[in-house]
Image (cartoon, rainbow, N blue to C red):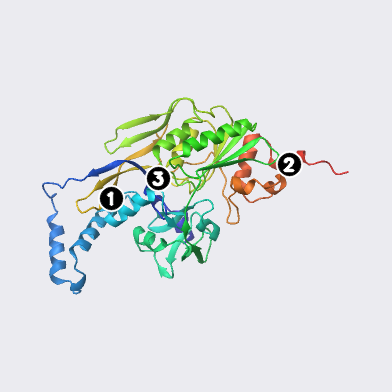
């Protein structure tokens, strides 16, 4: 199992409690009515042959429902594309649920679901979510839900099992990274409200710690406000944390990234035919000169990877942490005649310089692995810490970022701030 986890190819899927746009690729454009092909492709008669054999000879006649079989055939067609976790088929009910999620009203455990080598995983729990509070971690393999094995279940089925009314419990059987035994974790479902931006000044320093948890609709305006407050506080450097950030809206990715860049591309879009279109930096960014570093990890996906890739390509600041998740698909919705829909990956994102993000991820400039006992700190947890407490914390990625940004080992900085013993 350990070897399997080390070799997992990164793919992203549906969110447990948020819109598909926040993890399984940036959702772009509206619903497009699909057209049926006038002529069946060559060899399609084999499908009808198999269909007829099943109808004539399958022993359990009670489950020979045409709609169920048709949906199963479509799901098989989607799986054959090899774009698992990106392109997907949604029933009418699932499509309506997705639209409800995107409207911002939903309940769940507060985590993003992904797929690696066919196994369901937690891409990232959201800050302060029921999942995070219960001990669910990024990279956890989901083995079971409420005692039932889900390793061969569809993502939609797992999502349905994990969802539920506020205040109810769901028990996940998970295998943490680097663990040899599984663990059962019970999570109380709740309403998920995640602030896009939070920040604080690091103790006894002139370095700001800015956390961007998702690229939601207000991310750009929130980060502009935060950066202006950071400047007013006299910060001489900023650490931007997009660890466990599942991504979000393309417009917000461009707008947020533009606050740190002067000119050039934020990203490029490549169509199915190989045609590329550049998304340019928006002028007037409020943090073009302040020294910065960016924290990333395998929970950084979609728009978070666009942001990190642009910072790296423009040599605006160093990336510290671990390679990101590796998604960057533009999902276009094609509605079918019965209200179901195909979310089809019709384009993919590239970095500003044209590097592929999908299935590759963004590698850090300085690789720092957060160990199994390491604690991923946030501005809320750091705000009440002393410099010594921060130095002694287990967030080696944040500590490395501080040392990189200031050019001094953190222990030396702390020593300088302490009076000499008499």
Give residue 159's position: percent from left, percent from top: 38, 59
Question: What residue is shown with label 1?
Answer: 81
Q: Residues within 10 Å of mark 3 (few under 14, many from 20)?
A: many
- Tell me the residue that label 3 is attached to: 327
Taking the spot 60% from the left edge, 52% from the top edge, the residue there is 375
| Real-space CA distance between mark 1 and mark 2, rounded to the nearest whole angstrom | 54 Å
Gap in angstroms between the C-alphas marked 2 and 3: 39 Å
Q: Secondary structure at mark 3?
A: loop
Q: Can I make out residue 85 in this image? A: no
Q: Earlier in the sequence, mark 1 or mark 2?
A: 1
Residue identifier under label 2: 414
Q: Earlier in the sequence, mark 2 or mark 3?
A: 3
Question: What residue lies at 54% left-to-right and 60% top-to-bottom?
Answer: 134
Instruction: Categorize mark 2 by other alpha carbons within 10 Å: few (<14), some (14-19), many (20+).
Output: some
Residue at point 13%, 59% (across, down): 48
In the image, taking residue 337 as reference, residue 236 lies left or right, namely right
The answer to whether residue 324 is visible is yes
Relative vertical location of residue 279 with respect to residue 71 in this rendering, above or below:
above
Please identify the residue farthest to the right as the structure is shown. 422
Q: Mark 1, mark 2: which one is toward the viewer?
A: 2
Residue 236: image x %, image y %? 63, 31
The picture quadrant where one finds residue 270 is top left
Tell me which residue sits at (37%, 38%) in the image. 349
């Amino acid at each position: 199992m350990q070897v399997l986890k080390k070799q997992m190819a990164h793919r992203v899927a549906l969110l447990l409690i948020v819109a598909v746009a926040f993890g399984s690729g940036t959702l772009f454009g509206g619903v497009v009515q699909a057209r049926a092909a006038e002529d069946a492709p060559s060899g399609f008669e084999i499908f009808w042959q198999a269909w007829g054999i099943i109808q004539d000879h399958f022993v359990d006649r009670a489950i020979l429902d045409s709609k169920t079989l048709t949906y199963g055939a479509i799901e098989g067609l989607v799986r054959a594309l090899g774009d698992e976790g990106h392109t997907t088929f949604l029933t009418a009910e699932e499509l309506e649920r997705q639209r409800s999620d995107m409207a911002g009203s939903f309940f769940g455990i507060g985590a993003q679901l992904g797929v690696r080598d066919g196994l369901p995983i937690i891409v990232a729990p959201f800050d302060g979510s029921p999942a995070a509070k219960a001990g669910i971690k990024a990279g956890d393999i989901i083995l079971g839900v409420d005692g039932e094995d889900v390793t061969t279940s569809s993502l939609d089925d797992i999502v349905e099992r994990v969802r539920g009314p506020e205040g109810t419990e769901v028990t996940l059987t998970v295998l943490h990274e680097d663990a040899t035994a599984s663990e059962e974790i019970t999570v109380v479902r709740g309403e998920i409200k995640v602030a896009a931006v939070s920040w604080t000044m690091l103790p006894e320093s002139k370095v700001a710690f800015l956390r961007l948890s998702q690229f939601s609709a207000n991310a750009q305006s929130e980060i502009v406000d935060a950066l202006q407050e950071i400047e007013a506080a006299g910060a001489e450097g900023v650490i931007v944390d997009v660890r466990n950030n599942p991504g979000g809206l393309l417009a917000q990715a461009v707008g947020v990234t533009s606050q740190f860049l002067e000119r050039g591309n934020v990203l490029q879009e490549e169509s199915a035919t190989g045609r590329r279109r550049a998304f340019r930096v928006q002028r007037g960014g409020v943090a073009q000169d302040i020294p910065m570093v960016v924290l990333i990890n395998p929970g950084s996906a979609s728009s978070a990877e666009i942001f990190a890739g642009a910072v790296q390509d423009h040599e605006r600041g160093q990336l510290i942490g671990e390679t990101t998740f590796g998604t960057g698909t533009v999902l276009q919705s094609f509605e079918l005649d019965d209200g179901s829909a195909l979310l089809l990956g019709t384009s993919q994102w590239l970095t500003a310089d044209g590097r592929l993000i999908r299935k590759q991820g963004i590698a850090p400039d300085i690789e720092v692995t957060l160990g199994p006992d390491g604690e991923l700190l946030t501005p809320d947890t750091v705000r009440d810490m002393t410099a010594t407490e921060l130095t002694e914390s287990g967030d080696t990625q944040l500590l490395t970022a501080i040392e990189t940004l200031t050019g001094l080992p953190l222990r030396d900085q702390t020593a300088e701030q302490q009076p000499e013993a008499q």
